[in-house]
Image (cartoon, helix red, strand yellow):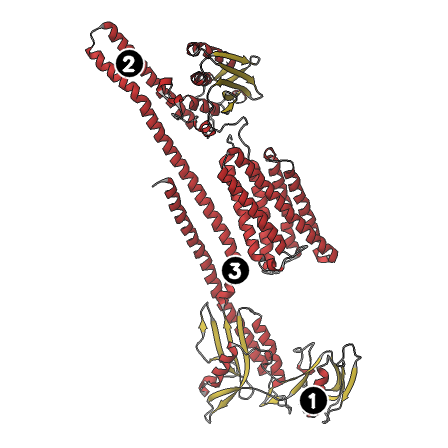
Amino acid sequence: MNKNKAKRSFVIRAVTAVVAIYVLIVGSVTYYGAKRNVMEGTTYSWGVIGNLINELNGCRSSASSKGVQDGMNLAKATSAISRNDWNLGIWDASGRTDSLILFRAQKDPKGNVIGMKMVSSNASVLSNNSFPDDSDKKRVILDDWFSPQQIQEISECCYLEASAEVRGYDTEEFFEPVSLQILYTGDEEGSALKKKDFIPVKKPDGNKLTTLKFEEVSVSPIDTTARQEQDETWRVLVKSAVDARIDQAELGEDGSTYIPLQEEDKSILRSESVCVTKLAAGDYFLGWSIVDHPLSKTIASTLWLYFIMAIICTAACLVLVGSYCRTIDGEYEAESKRRKMSDAMAHEMKTPLGIIKNYSEALLEEGDEQKRKQYLNTIIEETDSMNEMVVSMLDLSKMEAGTYPMELSMISMAGITEKVIERTRILAKNKQLEVELKADDERQILADEKLVTQSICNLLINAITHAEEGSRIRIVIEKEPQGMRFTIHNQGQQIDDKEQVRIWDSFYRGDSARNRSSGGTGLGLAIVRNTSLIHRGTCGCENEEGGVAFWIRIPDQEAGQTKQTGKIGPILHTADIGLNLKGLLYSMAGTGIWLLLNGFIFIWKRYEYQYDGALLLIPWIITIPAWVVCWLGARKLKFLADKTIPITASIAVIFAGIAASCFLTSDMMDVQLLLLLQVVLCLMTVCVVIYLLSMSSICKRLAEKAKEDGLKKIITLTGAAEAVVLVLWAASRDLVWQIPILSRLNNVISGVVFIVILGNLYLWYHLYRRFHGKEI
C-alpha cells in the first residue's frame, strides 16, 4: 500500500469513526431529551388540567342568571378555561397544539353517556379588557338586566374604544347594575369623547351601592372556546366526544378519573392525549386534546449542542488525521531514506569488493613477488576505503541519533583550515587551483576538533572537485557573537534550488559530485550538516555570481561544556538562524479564547437564557487579556511583518476595554450610550478582520520563504474566506447597519465564522509544527 492510499484509507476510517461517535453522542442526547420532554410535558399538562378541574368544580352555582346553566356558572368557567388554555400552551407554544372544551353529556335512561355536545350560551357579558381574567365579579351579565335593544346599543358604543362606569350591587357571583355610563369616541378621527347612560329594565335588589369602573370595556358572548383555534386537536376532540360511549361505572367520582377517548400515544415523535373527565356540576365534562412533538422540540432547543459537538468532532478529526499523516510521512520518509542509503551503500561497496575479489584471485596465481606486493597494497587501499565509509556511516548514525560522544577542546578554525589546505594542496595543484584564506583575528572556540576538521576537509574537497580548472577558491573565516563562520567560495556550475536542499542527504546523487570517478563516499555534506547541528549551529549553500558558496556556523560550546545533543532536522538554504514561531502559539491562544467567549455569548443570547448583566460582562473582561496575548504573539512575529500588526492588536485591546465599560453601564444605558456600544462593537469587528488578515499575511510570507506554493494558496484562500464571513457576520448583526436578508441568516453565518476561524487556527498550528526551529 503506497503512502497516498494509506492516507486515504485512514481518512475514510477516521471520518467514519468520528461521524459514528458524533451520531452516537448527539443521538443519545436527543433521545434522552425527547423522552424527558415527553415526561415533563405530560406532568406539566396534567398539572394544568388538574388545576382547571378544581376551578371548574368551583364554578357550581345556584344563582338565577342566564350566565348559569344546569348549575354551572358559564361566565366563570369561560374565564377559567381561557386562562388555563393559555397556561397549557406556554409549555412549548411552537411545538404543541391543544384544545380545551366544555361538554354536556347526553345519557340514556341507565345513566350511560351516549354522546357529548359543546356547551354554548347566548348570554352577553360586559367585562374589563384590561383585566379579563382577574375577577369574575367584574363581569356583568347584560341579558339579566338590559333589553336586547339596549345590549345592541351598548355593544356599538363599546366597539369605539370605550370606558365604562357601572353603579350597582356587588353580589357573591355577579355584579348587579343600577346604572351604566359609557364614554366612547366618535366615528371620526380626533373627535371628542361622548357619553351615554343606560338604565336597566330590571331593578336589582341590594344593600350597599358601589361603583365599578372599566378602563377598556367590551361586550362578548359567553363562549368557552373563544380563544382557541379550530385546529387538528379541536377536530379530533369534538369528533371523539360526539362519538363517546361511556358506561356509568367508568365515570367514577367527579374530576378523579381521566377517561381516554382514543388510545394515547407517548412516542418521542408525537405525543397525543385525548381525554375527558366528569365535573361536579350537572352533566358537564371537561375535554382536552393535546398534541406534542418532543423530538422536534428537543432538536430546536439543542441545536447549539449539535453545533459545538460538530466543531469538537471536526477539530478532533483534523488533529487525528493531521497527526497520522505526519507520522506516516515520517515513516515513509525514513523507510525511503533507509532504502536509498542501503542501495547507495551497496553500490559504493560493490566496486571495492569487486576489486578486492579480483586482486585476491590474481594474488593466488601470481608468482612475481613485486606484483604480489602491488596487489596487496591495492587490497589494503580498498579495505581502508570501505572502513572509512563504514566509520563515517557509524559516526553519522550516532550524530543523527544524538548519541555521538563529542570530545570538546579549544580549537582554532584558522589553524585547522591551514592544515587542511596543506593536505589537499596536491589535489588543488592537479586542477591548477589557487586556494586563498582570509581569516579574522585569531580566536579559539570550544568544539569537537575531529568533526570540525572533517567538515572543513569535506567542504574544501567538494569545492576542489566542482571548481573550474584554473580558477580560484576563496575561504573566509569570520567571528560572530556566538562562534565562528566558515565560508568557502568556488567558481563553477551553480546548484538548482531544489538540489540545494537534497545535497545534504546521505548518498544523494544529483550530479557527478557523487560518483567514484571523483572520489569520496557520498557522505561528506551529510557529515557537515550533522556537525553543525550537533554543535547547535547551522549550515547551508547559496548560488552567487559565477559559482557557489558553502558555509557552516560553529557556535562556541564554552557556555555549556556538557555533552551536546543537537536536534537533527531538515536544513534549508538560508543565511538566518532557526525560525522562532512561538508567536503563532500566542496568537492561537488569544484568538481561540476570543472565539470561545463570543460563542458563549452568542449561544446565551440566542436561546434567551435568563441572565444577570454581570454574567455576560465576564467574557468581555476576559477578552482583554486574550487580545494582550495576541499582541505579544504579533510582537514575536514582527520579523515576518511590518509594524502594523502590534498596533492592530493594541487597538483591539482598547476596543475590548471600551466595550466592556459600555456593557458595565448597560442597565442604565440611554439611546446615546447604546449607539456608542454598537459603534464600538462594529469597530472591534473591523479590527478583528484587520488582525486576522495581517496574520494571514504573516503566514503567507512564511510560505513564500519556504517556497511552498500550495501552502501559500491555501493561506490566501483561508484569509479571504475569513474576511468575507466576518464582514457578512458584521452586516447580519444589529450594529450600525443591518442587511435584512443577512439578519435572517445570522445563526448560519455565525456558525460559518466559527468554523472558518477554527480552521485557520489549525493552519497556524500546522505552520508552527512544520517550520518552528527550522531553517528556511
Q: Residues within 10 Å of mark 1 (few under 14, many from 20)?
A: some
Q: Is residue 600 left or right of residue 496?
A: right
Q: Secondary structure at mark 2?
A: helix
Q: Give the mark nearer the N terminus: 1 vs 2.
A: 1
Determine contact: label 1, label 3, CB under 8 Å.
no
Q: Is residue 439 left or right of residue 449?
A: right
42 up-or-down from 739: above or below: below
Q: How many marks?
A: 3
Q: In front: 414, or 564?
A: 414
Q: Position of residue 714 (x, y in %)?
A: 51, 43
Asked where in the image residue 336 lies, by quadrant, the reply is top left
Amino acid at the residue labelled 2: Ile
Q: Give the mark nearer the N terminus: 1 vs 3.
A: 1
Amino acid at the residue labelled 1: Ile
Reading the image, the residue beneath label 1 is: 151
Calculate the distance from the C-alpha at mark 1 to the C-alpha at mark 3. Answer: 53 Å
| Residue at the spot 55% in from the left edge and 27% down from the top edge | 576
User: Can residue 212 be seen from the camera position used here?
Assistant: no
Please name which of the two marks, 2 or 3, marks the residue nearer to the observer: 2
Q: Secondary structure at mark 1?
A: helix
Q: Secondary structure at mark 3?
A: loop
Reading the image, the residue beneath label 2 is: 379
Q: Position of residue 669 (x, y in %)?
A: 73, 57
Q: Position of residue 253 (x, y in %)?
A: 50, 84
Q: Is residue 159 left or right of residue 635?
A: right
Q: Which mark is residue 302?
A: 3
567 up-or-down from 436: above or below: below
User: Can residue 85 be seen from the camera position used here?
Assistant: yes
Q: In front: 772, or 117?
A: 772
Q: Position of residue 484 (x, y in %)?
A: 54, 19
Asked where in the image residue 359 lies, by quadrant, the reply is top left
| Residue at the spot 50% in from the left edge and 56% down from the top edge | 306
